[in-house]
């Protein structure tokens, strides 16, 4: 028991000495304001945070999320094809795809799919 405590103290001391030496000889030269600021995907971190946001980008992101959720709903349907009744399965898939097509048609009529303004 005594040797275990001594070994633990020695390991902690060695780690403490290594951390102190590392901090003393590290290549930290000067504190750069740009490097210490958070990086936000291409935005200038020192400018105003209230920049105008593209509504078209937001709509495209929402459409992507909707299609992403649709894929997560379609995958289990493909897996359950083996164990379900084919008539019920085809009715459910038909309704699901019909809802997707109606939603796509609605987005198309609203102009959400126009890529260029």
Image (cartoon, rainbow, N blue to C red):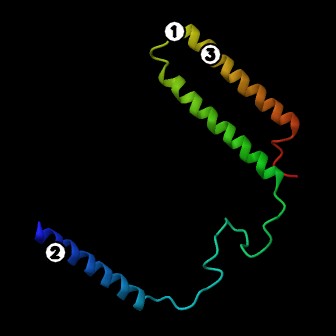
User: Circle 1 — which element?
Assistant: loop
- Looking at the image, is mark 1 or mark 3 earlier in the sequence? 1
User: Circle 3 — which element?
Assistant: helix
Quarter of the image where one finds residue 32: bottom right
15 vs 35, nearest the viewer: 15
- Looking at the image, is mark 1 or mark 2 earlier in the sequence? 2
3 or 2: mark nearer the eye: 2
User: Circle 2 — which element?
Assistant: helix
Q: Which mark is residue 85?
A: 1
2 vs 97, nearest the viewer: 2
Q: Above or below — where is 64 with respect to 78? A: below
Say which residue appears at 21% left-offset and 71% top-offset. Answer: 8
Residue named by callout 3: 92
- Looking at the image, is mark 3 or mark 2 earlier in the sequence? 2
Real-space CA distance between mark 1 and mark 2, rounded to the nearest whole angstrom = 69 Å
Place of residue 48 in the rendered image (x, y in percent of width and height, measured from the top left): 80, 71
Residue named by callout 2: 6
Q: Above or below — where is 77 with respect to 71? A: above
1 or 2: mark nearer the eye: 2
């Amino acid at each position: 028991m005594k040797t275990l405590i001594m070994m633990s103290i020695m390991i902690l001391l060695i780690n403490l000495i290594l951390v102190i030496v590392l901090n003393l000889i590290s290549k930290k030269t000067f504190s750069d304001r740009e490097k210490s600021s958070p990086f936000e995907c291409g935005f200038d971190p020192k400018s105003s945070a209230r920049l105008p946001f593209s509504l078209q980008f937001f709509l495209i992101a929402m459409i992507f999320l909707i299609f992403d959720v649709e894929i997560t709903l379609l995958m289990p349907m493909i897996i359950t094809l083996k164990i379900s009744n084919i008539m019920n399965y085809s009715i459910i898939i038909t309704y699901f795809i019909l809802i997707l097509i109606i939603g796509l048609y609605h987005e198309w009529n609203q102009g959400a799919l126009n890529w260029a303004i």
